[in-house]
Image (cartoon, rainbow, N blue to C red):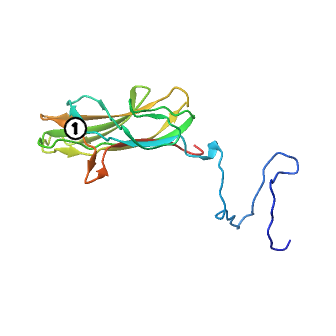
Amino acid sequence: MADGTLKVGTITTSSGSGTITLGQSGETVDMANGSITLSSDMKATPAFEAYVGTIVTGLSSGTWTKVAANTEIYDTDSNYDTSNYRFTPTTAGKYLVYVNTCIGSASDYQMYGAFNAIYKNGSAIRMHNDNFNPSYDHNEASPFLSSVVDMNGSSDYLEAYARVYTGSGTWNIFTDAGGAKVSWFGAHRIIGA
């Protein structure tokens, strides 16, 4: 067949079912000049990311505190609740989940440990620890945690928590530094996993 343009409204197999192959080994199929509609199985959604928009104050040493990520950057399926800081995806699958917190004090230097945790259905399932013990000369830490979590798509939910260990002082989860967000929580479904 000579080079040319094929204009059709619908392409189907001759039997009406099966696989349609575009191109062959060694060829590139270029779809850059049009828009592509993907089925929900081919999208990395539901997905969200939110950041801590208001400083969380008064962390108690050794006590888990929910990360109050109350300001959404995006929420593709409206599955993140900014009032209770909970993500309840409505699609089953494996999700890449991540949390970062900037825990610190403006005046105290008594921190010897900072933690993040991912909670599923109210229980910690993943944890990260920045441990400075026996040194007590830190006033800030930014632990980051990411993990893949299997979700059932109906009742499973995710939350992020932080914890600090200190000798004394007043401790917070900060919102930003020089305009950059420093405490956030997010997740997205992994395609094909």
Which of the two residues, 140 or 84, is positioned nearer the viewer here?
84
Q: Quick one: which residue is furthest to the right in this view?
A: 14
Q: Compared with residue 118, is residue 4 higher up or lower down, i.e. above or below?
A: below
Q: Position of residue 177 (x, y in %)?
A: 25, 51
Kindly tell me whether residue 189 is visible in this rendering: yes
Q: Residue furthest bottom?
A: 2
Query: Could you tell me the amino acid type at mark 1?
Result: Asn
Is residue 98 at least partly visible in the picture?
no
Q: Quadrant of the C terminus?
A: top right
Q: Position of residue 124 (x, y in %)?
A: 38, 30
Residue 154 occupies which quadrant of the picture?
top right
Q: Which residue is painted at 17% across and 41% down in the image? A: 105
Out of 28 and 173, give the one closest to the viewer. Answer: 173
Give x and y (percent) for residue 45.
Answer: 55, 42
Quarter of the image for the N terminus: give it: bottom right
Say left or right for 23 vs 95.
Answer: right
Measuring 28% from the left and 38% from the top, which residue is drawn there?
115
In the rendered image, which quarter is residue 21 located in?
bottom right
**Which residue is at 56% across, 37% downward?**
93
Q: Is residue 145 left or right of residue 7?
A: left
Report the side of 117 relative to 158 (left or right): left
Q: Secondary structure at mark 1?
A: strand
Q: Report x, y in % for residue 69.
A: 35, 38
Question: Can you tell which quarter of the image residue 173 is in?
Answer: top left
**Around disc 1, counting alpha carbons within 10 Å, would you say few (fewer than 14), some (14 to 19), or many (20 or more)?**
some
Q: Which residue is mark 1?
A: 172
Label tally: 1
